[in-house]
Amino acid sequence: MTSQRAASIIASSNIPGAPASVKLVLASASPRRLQLLERVGLAPDLLNPPDVDEIPRKRETPRALSVRLARAKAERAREMPLVRALGPNAFILAADTVVGLGRRILPKAMTEDEARDCLSLLSGRSHYVYSSLCLISPGNRVSSRCVETKVRFKRLSREDVDSYMACGEWRGKAGGYAIQGRAEAFVRLITGSYSGVMGLPLHETVQLLEGAGYPVFHSWMTAPPSGV
């Protein structure tokens, strides 16, 4: 995006002191992604999670699935009535996170058996977390990123797994664990983006928004202190 176009978007943004025009849509129902955005001073104007089929295609790799689903979510959200009602200057951000062990895609564990199977596979081994972003900016410009993070677990004991099952944090999580909770104690080494493993790689998210012309840093200057 040219600096002239970026300046024109900032001039008509919804940031205090400018007309309400630019809007940020988070196409996700994840409370973690919302919390992560807020951590870097960004507050979506609309949360609009789309319904997409997340079943992997035949021979689809974990990375390819993550990239495809992020784009599908953004494109589906763009057509939804609440998003269309925001007007032409809406930025639509979607994300998807997939845990992979080699070419194997680990599920979002919905049952205890699924979670135990995931942890058994991850125990004492390295795996990859693929966190993909897709941003549709004004003018229907589509940009995307995929952030790959390597995570190595310690060898898990039966007590580790039983205790983690009892806490319930595994439910609905890719790979059967949530790194921002008790499962962080299982991690021996992480190479890449911690926030990406949580579900939204913040460095790449800010880069994507800034590159598309969204007034990221202007919002920092006008928002109240975060209390950090």
Image: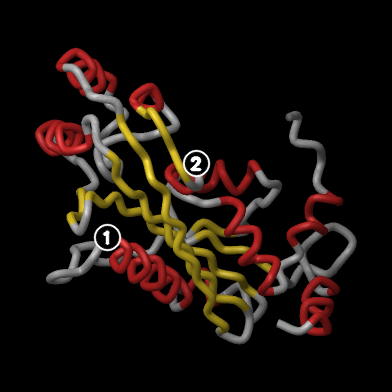
Write down the quadrant of residue 104 in the picture: bottom left
Marks 2 & 1, CB-CB < 8 Å contact: no
Q: Nearer the viewer, residue 144 or 79?
A: 144
- Label 1: which secondary element: helix
Q: Residues within 10 Å of mark 2 (few under 14, many from 20)?
A: some
Vertically, is 171 above or below 52? Answer: above
What residue is shown with label 1?
62
Vertically, is 16 above or below 152? Answer: below
What residue is shown with label 2?
194
Instruction: Say which label, 2 or 1, has the lower sequence index.
Output: 1
Residue appearing at x 81%, y 71% in the figure: 10
Q: Amino acid at mark 2?
A: Tyr
Q: Residue 9: give x, y in percent of width and height.
A: 77, 76
Q: Residue furthest left?
A: 113
Q: Amino acid at mark 1?
A: Pro
Q: Residues within 10 Å of mark 1 (few under 14, many from 20)?
A: many
**Distance from the alpha carbon under mark 2 to that under mark 1:** 18 Å
Vertically, is 55 above or below 109? Answer: below
Task: Please count the marks in the image.
Answer: 2
Residue appearing at x 20%, y 33% in the figure: 119
